[in-house]
């Protein structure tokens, strides 16, 4: 099965965060590929990845990066596919703000859908929503996921009402 989503990251140290996107795509039954593409250390690999992504059948790219975090924006500059940026708090980061702002503050004409710091789970859900815009089966799975979140909250409301606040929550 050809992947519909690409999950890329600037370094293997980003995998602990980016695996959450893979887990969400798996839960929605969306095929994906996951690899390392460094904007700074492998610029030609980055160009090649972005410029042939559509012809390989990808529908969306999730790009995670820490520090200067140029990967999502550079990928977005090279493809017309939707790019979802995940800023990652890295060891050389300024509390992650450098990554957030690098991805968030894109110039006009080069949009990147920017998730929260370390927000790969939401990136996976957002990618599923993008694919679901054109695939009713995926859309139904995303809808069911969101309904499950509502049910989870309502269960906690009932627990609080019936047992009181002193018993805590799981």
Image: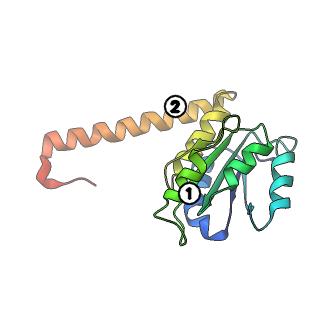
Q: Distance between the residues labelled 2 and 1?
A: 31 Å
- Secondary structure under tag 2 reads helix
Image position of 40 (left or right of 159)? right
Q: How crowded is mark 2: few (under 14 residues within 10 Å), some or many (20 or more)?
A: few
Total numbered circles: 2
Image position of 146 (left or right of 161)? right
Residue 114 position in % (x across, y down): 57, 44
Compared to residue 3, the image places residue 133 above or below, namely: above
Quarter holding residue 20: bottom right
State if disc 1 and disc 2 touch (CB < 8 Å).
no
- Secondary structure under tag 1 reads helix
- In the picture of the structure, the residue carrying the numbered disc 1 is 99
Image position of 146 (left or right of 28)? left
- Colour style of the rendered protein structure: rainbow
Residue lying furthest front: 107
Q: Residue at x 74, y 60 (%)?
A: 39
Label placed on residue 143: 2
**Quadrant where the image shows the C terminus:** bottom left
Image position of 133 (left or right of 122)? right
Label placed on residue 90: none
Compared to residue 138, the image places residue 86 above or below, namely: below
Q: Residue at x 69, y 48 (%)?
A: 73
Foreground residue, 18 or 72?
72
């Amino acid at each position: 099965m050809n992947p519909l989503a690409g999950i890329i990251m600037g370094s293997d140290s980003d995998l602990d965060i980016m695996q959450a996107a893979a887990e969400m795509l798996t839960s929605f039954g969306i095929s994906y590929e996951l690899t390392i593409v460094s904007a700074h250390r492998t610029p030609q690999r980055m160009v090649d990845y972005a410029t042939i992504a559509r012809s390989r059948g990808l529908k969306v790219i999730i790009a995670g990066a820490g520090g200067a975090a140029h990967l999502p924006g550079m990928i977005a500059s090279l493809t017309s596919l939707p790019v979802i940026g995940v800023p990652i708090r890295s060891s050389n980061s300024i509390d992650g703000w450098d990554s957030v702002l690098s991805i968030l503050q894109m110039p006009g004409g080069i949009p990147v859908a920017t998730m929260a710091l370390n927000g790969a789970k939401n990136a996976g859900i957002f990618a599923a929503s993008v694919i679901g815009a054109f695939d009713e089966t995926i859309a139904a799975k995303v809808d069911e996921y969101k309904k499950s979140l509502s049910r989870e909250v309502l269960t906690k409301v009932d627990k609080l009402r019936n047992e009181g606040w002193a018993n805590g929550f799981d």
